[in-house]
Image: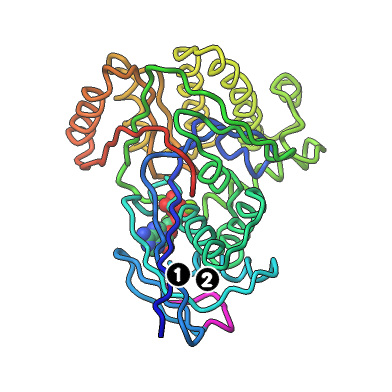
């Protein structure tokens, strides 16, 4: 028997720079791929079995012909979901054996789920010598997450991980599906700080926000909150206060993304940083998707020398924050952020200085 060739694919995690909860509201988002990710490495197997192992999650082996979501080893559903979606696209995925490795923390809001889906998709396409347009790959991974993992995520995570480019932000218009990469101003650094509280504990909150923003769009009689401006919203006193807050967050986040694109193109770090601060304040007051821990990380960061802005990143309700700072201050900001957060909350947070890196490959 000849040994099957060993192939691999890699996909990075991502941060959401701006555009919080805008993706499923037909809005615009700004993300960046980070320098940590997941790799899937393996080969075709004889006999049609699919076996996948992960250093952190264990080992799963299933018959390859009938794929359905697992109840016990739920982590493997991200992989099996991709197998199922690729088969729906007429790519006849055969049995394979693969291992997942990487430094990307799971459940911290850095989108390890999308990284796992994309590493799987690119690995399987390579293994079967097939190609798909990038956006079709991103959407197949999103459907895998919806159908096999039961998470109704928007497309931001997959698009950012796939289209990421070193030292560039990724702009994505969720309605027109335009993807653009925008140079990140030189001399600025991103710091990621984990709050130590997992976001997945509160997935009910995520779905509730989805329902509330839908209700706000219905009340405003627009197809999506994308179709409202903050000026128009100010005149709608008929909207119940809670829905007005939710809508204001989405509408203003969209406006912040458009302004951020201009600031980035102009190399205006302080302008961009101010938008991050405004975004967090809106999360705290209007959207109520922050937590005391995220607020603490943000307020510590905002008061450190060299910091231009800070906010929660991703869905909220736990997870991580991003801090934008001047490059020479980065080491000291990261050290102080971890130290002061531990002193005030008792939580040891993982704080990393992350480069903006290339996308999946
Ligand atoms: P996030 O995408 O923010 O990291 P999610 O809850 O969406 O959080 O996805 C995390 C899930 O992805 C984990 O619970 C696990 O099922 C899967 N996952 C992430 N990393 C790995 C890994 N290295 N090996 C196996 N499964 C992983
Ligand atoms: Mg995820």
Tell me the crowding category of disc 2: few under 14, some 14 to 19, or many 20 or more residues within 10 angstroms, Cα based.
Answer: many
Q: Is mark 2 within 8 Å of ligand 1?
A: no
Tell me the crowding category of disc 1: few under 14, some 14 to 19, or many 20 or more residues within 10 angstroms, Cα based.
Answer: many
Question: Circle 2 — which element?
Answer: helix
How far is disc 2 from disc 1 in space, using C-alphas? 6 Å
Residue 232 rendering spot, x and y as whole percentages: 76, 22
Residue 68 rendering spot, x and y as whole percentages: 57, 77
- 4 or 268, which lies in front? 4
Residue 39 among magenta residues:
no
- The residue at 51%/26% (across/down) is 279
- The residue at 28%/14% (across/down) is 305
270 over 354 or under it: above or below: above
> Would you say 73 lies left or right of 211 here?
left
For label 2, the residue is: 80
Quadrant in which ligand 1 is drawn: bottom left
- The residue at 21%/22% (across/down) is 332
> Where residue 76 is drawn, which disc sits there?
1
Residue lying farthest front?
Answer: 2
Label pair 2/1, CB-CB below 8 angstroms? yes
Res. 300 visible in picture: yes
- 209 or 174, which lies in front? 174
Q: Is mark 1 within 8 Å of ligand 1?
A: yes
Residue 69 among magenta residues:
yes
- 249 or 175, which lies in front? 175
Question: Circle 1 — which element?
Answer: helix
Residue 34 rendering spot, x and y as whole percentages: 41, 39
249 over 275 or under it: above or below: below
Res. 202 visible in picture: no
> Where residue 286 is drawn, which disc sits there?
none
Q: Which residues are magenta?
A: 64-74
349 over 86 or under it: above or below: above
> Would you say 319 lies left or right of 136 here?
left
């Amino acid at each position: 028997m000849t040994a099957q060739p060993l192939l691999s694919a890699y996909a990075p995690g991502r941060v959401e720079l701006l555009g919080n909860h805008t993706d499923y509201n037909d809005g615009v988002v700004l993300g960046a791929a980070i320098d940590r990710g997941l790799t899937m490495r393996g080969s075709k197997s004889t006999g049609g079995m699919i076996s996948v192992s992960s250093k952190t999650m264990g080992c799963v082996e299933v018959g390859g012909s009938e794929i359905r979501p697992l109840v016990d080893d739920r982590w493997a559903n991200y992989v099996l979901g991709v197998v199922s979606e690729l088969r729906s696209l007429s790519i006849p995925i055969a049995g394979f054996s693969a291992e997942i490795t990487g430094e990307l923390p799971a459940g911290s809001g850095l989108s390890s789920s999308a990284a796992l889906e994309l590493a799987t998709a690119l690995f399987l396409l390579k293994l079967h010598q097939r190609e798909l347009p990038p956006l079709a790959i991103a959407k197949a991974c999103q459907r895998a997450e919806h159908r096999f993992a039961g998470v109704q995520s928007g497309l931001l995570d997959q698009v950012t991980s796939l289209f990421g480019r070193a030292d560039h932000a990724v702009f994505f218009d969720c309605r027109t599906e335009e993807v653009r990469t925008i140079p990140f101003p030189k001399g600025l650094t991103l710091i990621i700080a984990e709050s130590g509280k997992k976001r997945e504990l509160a997935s009910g909150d995520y779905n509730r926000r989805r329902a509330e923003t839908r209700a706000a769009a219905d009340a405003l009689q627009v197809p999506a909150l994308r179709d409202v401006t903050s000026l128009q919203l100010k005149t709608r006193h008929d909207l119940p206060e809670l829905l007005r807050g939710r809508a204001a967050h989405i509408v203003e986040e969209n406006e912040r993304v458009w302004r951020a694109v201009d600031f980035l193109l102009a190399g205006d770090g302080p302008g961009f940083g101010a938008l991050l601060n405004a975004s967090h304040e809106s999360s705290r007051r209007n959207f109520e998707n922050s937590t005391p821990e995220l607020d603490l990380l943000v307020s510590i960061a905002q008061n450190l020398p060299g910091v231009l802005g800070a906010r929660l990143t991703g869905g909220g309700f736990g997870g991580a924050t991003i801090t934008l700072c001047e490059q020479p201050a980065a080491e000291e900001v990261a050290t102080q952020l971890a130290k002061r957060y531990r002193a005030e909350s008792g939580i040891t947070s993982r704080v990393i200085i992350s480069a903006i890196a290339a996308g999946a490959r």
